[in-house]
Image: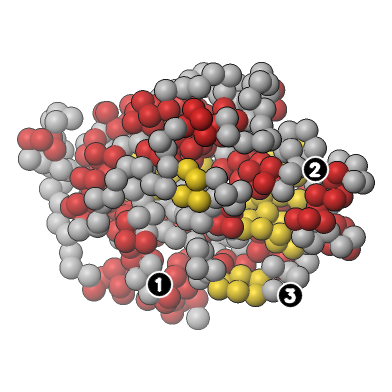
Amino acid sequence: MAHGLLRLLHAAIRDRPRIFVNTALPTTPLAWVNGSDAPEKPSLDIGFMALTDCASVVVAATQGFAQQFGLTLNLRRQASWAGLRDRLVSGELDAAHCLYGLVYAVHLGIGGVPASPLAVLMGLNQNAQAINLSPALQRKGVTSPEALARLVHQQGARLTFAQTFPTGTHALWLYYWLASQGIHPLHDVTSVVVPPAQMAPHLQAGRIDGFCVGEPWSADALARGQGFTLATSQSIWPDHPEKVLASAHGFVEQYPNSARALIKSVLAAARFIEQSQENRRGTAQLLSGSAYLNTPVGSIEPRLLGDYQDGLGHRWHDPHGLRLFDQGRTNLPYLSDGMWFMTQFRRWGLLRDDPDYLAVASQVQQLALYREAATALGVPCADPPMRSSLLIDGSRWDGSDPHGYARSFHLHALDAAPDARVRR
């Protein structure tokens, strides 16, 4: 079965029209303008974490897509987001599958590291993260948001929740969801950092009461009998931004053709994965291998297909499940997406003052480069750089007033000094 699914991936790549690239190396970084699009640096080291949403990066590297654009992608699995961050900043990694919030935190110098200019080349996925609670809470009947709020406020329980990086998406989804239930994430509960694959063992050992994490580790915890899924991230913000393909800004400046070719490679792979359910299943099989997620395909495939069960007897097909392409809507690096993360840094006191939200996002989001790559592939990319979304608490985010938006929440830490907990 496994070999058959992988053969499907290989056959689909083989049978597609070949795209020939000029392999002669240009002599200047203006080669794109001068008529050559050959990568200045054809072999790239690409970091990733063992998460389902690294799918398009893995498929691009291993199934022939990168080679079509003159690249070899050397995948480097990382043990933690902090390690990935450090290697991205140092240049040990040319680019990486990366948390959206991590990029902006590094760019702004949040979290005990010097500010270092980073770039978002493209979005990698939307949706498909989850908040789980422990078996102990399940046995107590704490299986709804209301029951959790009662436990915290009426019984005075001091619960510990894990997320994967202090300025990452999982911390911010956890904070946003708790706040939407009237639970202050910095005052009413304790938040700790745990690497994604270690969530279930920490839950089993009783060190944490719940967590927010990317797949497959929420589903993996259920498969181990470790608790249940209380909320998905797409229930917080349908089609929210999640992981990005990130690099140092200097990489884009020094190797613009390589950056463009990398976007093309990953975008083509994302399009391929979503062409059919069989391609998605083949991707799940590929990701289950020891070099990537190293976990049973049964913990990966269902939620990659949008099929959920929460461990409490409820099953559903989620219309806002994992999106890797969605006709390019997933991949456009919207300015408003980057700006939203900065509003949450300000809301929770990670930023003492408001940045110039639009100016910073315009520096980080590589819209022009992405549109060049997408246009070359025939992927729609004409959407405006701002998009409008309605979140779980009824607030609407459209990027028009980030200063006011950051101050619009009942629960916040606007007056707090940046907290030492971000120093990881």
Q: Quadrant of residue 14?
A: bottom left
Which residue: 60% across, 26% down?
A: 350
Q: Residue 242's x, y, as percent?
A: 49, 48
Q: Residue at x 37, y 38 (%)?
A: 335
Residue at screen point 73% across, 69% down: 311
Residue 8: image location, x then y, percent: 37, 76
Neighbour class for label 3 at 10 Å: few (<14), some, many (≥20)? few
Could you say whether the residue bearing mark 3 is in a helix, strand or loop? loop
The image position of residue 24, as x and y in percent, is 13, 42
Calculate the distance from the C-alpha at mark 1 to the C-alpha at mark 2.
39 Å
Q: Which residue is mark 2?
A: 160
Q: Earlier in the sequence, mark 1 or mark 2?
A: 2
Element type where label 1 sits in the image = helix
Q: Tag 3 or tag 1, which sits nearer the N-term? A: 1
Q: Is residue 230 above or below residue 381?
A: below
Marks 3/2: CA–CA distance: 25 Å
- Color scheme of the displayed model: secondary structure
Mark on residue 279? Answer: 1
Q: Nearer the viewer, mark 1 or mark 3?
A: 3
Q: Amino acid at mark 1?
A: Asn
Classify mark 2: residues with Cα within 10 Å, few (<14), some (14-19) or many (20+).
some
Q: CA distance from mark 1 to mark 3?
A: 28 Å
Q: Is residue 399 above or below residue 312?
A: above
Q: Amino acid at mark 3?
A: Gly
